[in-house]
Image: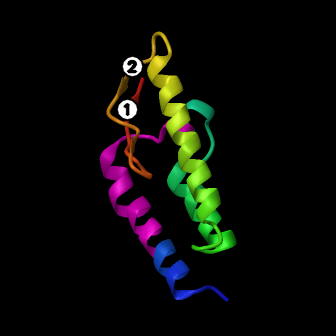
Amino acid sequence: MTSPATRLALVGIDGYRRHLSPLKGFRCAHAALFGGASCSQAVRDIVERDGLLAGRAAVVARLDRCRSAYAHLRGAPGVQVQGLCCCGPLPIPFRCG
């Protein structure tokens, strides 16, 4: 059984992905560097699989990997990155290309 907090988190993530993400025109650093799922999709998968509270460590680990990917992209020659990656625990979208 899914907790109310987990259901609310999933609704929030889905709302972000459906209404805000398409407007920003940016990708997360992890997806830009490694391909695959964006952080919002990866976090949604974790929360859906493990629950909001039990999935906290996995969510933090994913966001840490996103920060590391941003740092790698920012220092790569010939790669133009605009914006910031993280503000506290939350990634901020950026442009890469």
- The reply to whether dot 2 and dot 1 touch (C-beta < 8 Å) is yes
In the rendered image, residue 46, in percent from the top left (x then y), is placed at 64, 63
Magenta stretch: includes residue 17: yes
Q: Which residue is mark 1?
A: 95
Part of the protein shown in magenta = 11-30
> What residue lies at 44% left-to-right and 23% top-to-bottom?
74
In the rendered image, residue 49, in percent from the top left (x then y), is placed at 69, 70
Q: Say which amino acid is labelled 2.
A: Gln
Judge whether 77 appears above or below 35 on screen. above
Which label's residue is closer to the chain start, 2 or 1?
2
Q: Is residue 55 left or right of residue 13?
A: right
Give how far apart the Cα atoms at labels 2 and 1 are. 8 Å
Residue 93 is drawn in which quadrant?
A: top left
Q: Residue furthest top?
A: 77
Q: Is residue 80 left or right of residue 57?
A: left
Give 66 or 12, whichever is nearer the viewer.
66
> What residue lies at 64% left-to-right and 58% top-to-bottom?
58
Residue 45: tell me if it is visible.
Answer: no
Q: Say which amino acid is labelled 1.
A: Arg
Magenta stretch: includes residue 69: no
In the rendered image, residue 38, in percent from the top left (x then y), is placed at 54, 48
The dot on residue 80 is 2
> What residue lies at 56% left-to-right and 64% top-to-bottom?
44
> What residue lies at 53% left-to-right and 50% top-to-bottom?
39
Magenta stretch prevailing secondary structure:
helix
Give 9 or 63, whichever is nearer the viewer.
63
Identify the secondary structure beneath mark 1: strand
Locate the C terminus by quadrant: top left
